[in-house]
Amino acid sequence: MSLDPTIAARLKRNEAGLVAAIAQDATTGAVLMQAWMNDEALHLTLTTGQATYWSRSRDELWVKGATSGHTQAVREVRLDCDGDTILLQVDQSGGACHTGDDTCFDAGLLPLDLPAGVTK
């Protein structure tokens, strides 16, 4: 089976045929990680309910948690207005980051250097 053609037609892929995917905790709203999907990964995600991505480093599909046990059960999948980013709302089991951390976005807050008069 393959990705529904009406969904496939809405995607804007990069030169490698991939679309950015953001995983967000469905309960807390925390942004967990960013990964990549090809059409097959999106199809598998939509039909199995388990977050499936394309590993650029391994050049293969990977189901989140297949080796670590830190799975992502998908509650909802959204496509942004441009068709170039997918948002997965997931129930995360264990750490989402490959480092084992809860989120990949805790590596450090970057300082804002705002001009005078502009507030956070």
Image (tube, rainbow, N blue to C red):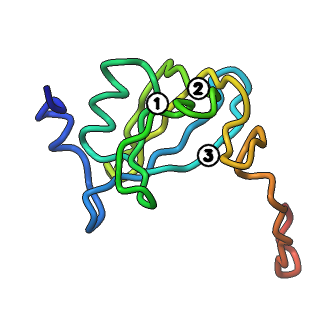
Dot 1 amino acid type: Ala
Q: Residue at x 42, y 42 (%)?
A: 53
Residue underneath mark 3? 33
Whole-angstrom CA distance, mark 1 to mark 3, is: 12 Å
Q: Which mark is residue 71?
A: 2
Whole-angstrom CA distance, mark 2 to mark 1, is: 8 Å
Q: Are marks 2 and 1 in contact (CB under 8 Å)?
A: yes
Disc 1 packing (10 Å; few <14; some 14–19; many ≥20): many
Left or right of 56 on screen, residue 114:
right
Q: Earlier in the sequence, mark 1 or mark 3?
A: 3
Q: Residue at x 29, y 47 (%)?
A: 38
Q: Quadrant of the N terminus?
A: top left
Along the viewing direction, whichever of 4 and 36 lies nearer the viewer: 36
Disc 2 packing (10 Å; few <14; some 14–19; many ≥20): many
Dot 3 amino acid type: Met
Q: Earlier in the sequence, mark 2 or mark 3?
A: 3
Instruction: Kindly state the secondary structure of the residue where label 1 is placed.
Output: loop
Rendering coords of residue 2 (x, y %): 15, 31
Q: Which mark is residue 51?
A: 1
Q: Residue at x 48, y 38 (%)?
A: 87
Foreground mark, 2 or 3, reads 2
Q: Earlier in the sequence, mark 2 or mark 1?
A: 1
